[in-house]
Amino acid sequence: MIDPISQTMNAAAAGMRAQSQRLSVASENLSNADTHGYKRKTLSFTEQMDGTNGTSTVGVSRPQLDRSQGEMIFDPNHPLANEQGMVESSNVDMIIEMADAREANRSFEANLTTFKQAGEMYRGLLGLLR
């Protein structure tokens, strides 16, 4: 029999891991927003099956590179300049990354609240059984 409280705690923990990785990628993108030629990294959420009890939780894929081109800037003295003197800037949009980081943080906090409430239910159940 699957314990619903334990299942809830496992799902919340998986959600916190996924949002933590999402926040890490958003932070990396933000820190490299001014790096010429840097390509934005993205994550996709995946469904993962738990082999022990047959339930599914959330996971994340490996980071993928956003292949869109950054703005081209004329700077013939830059070491990364092409034959025409153009340098590709980063394709990171700081507003999108800040919004993504904020959403990941809020989702992490929601999963943390769920995890804490499930723990309180366990403590209450143990108190009733005494």
Image (spheres, rainbow, N blue to C red):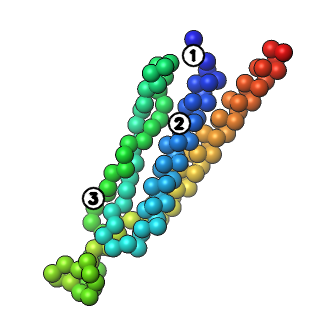
Lower position in the chain sequence, tag 1 or tag 3: 1
At horizontal 43% and vertical 62% (from top left) the residue drawn is 29
Q: How many marks?
A: 3
At horizontal 63% and vertical 45% (from top left) the residue drawn is 109
Residue 41 against residue 47 in the figure, above or below? below
Q: Which mark is residue 67?
A: 3
Q: Are marks 1 and 3 in contact (CB under 8 Å)?
A: no
Residue 113 against residue 71 in the figure, above or below? above
The percent coordinates of residue 44 (x first, y second) are: 39, 44
Q: Secondary structure at mark 3?
A: loop
At horizontal 59% and vertical 49% (from top left) the residue drawn is 106
The percent coordinates of residue 42 (x first, y second) are: 38, 52
Residue located beneath label 1 in the image: 2
Q: Secondary structure at mark 1?
A: loop
At horizontal 23% and vertical 80% (from top left) the residue drawn is 81
Q: Which mark is residue 14?
A: 2
Lower position in the chain sequence, tag 1 or tag 2: 1
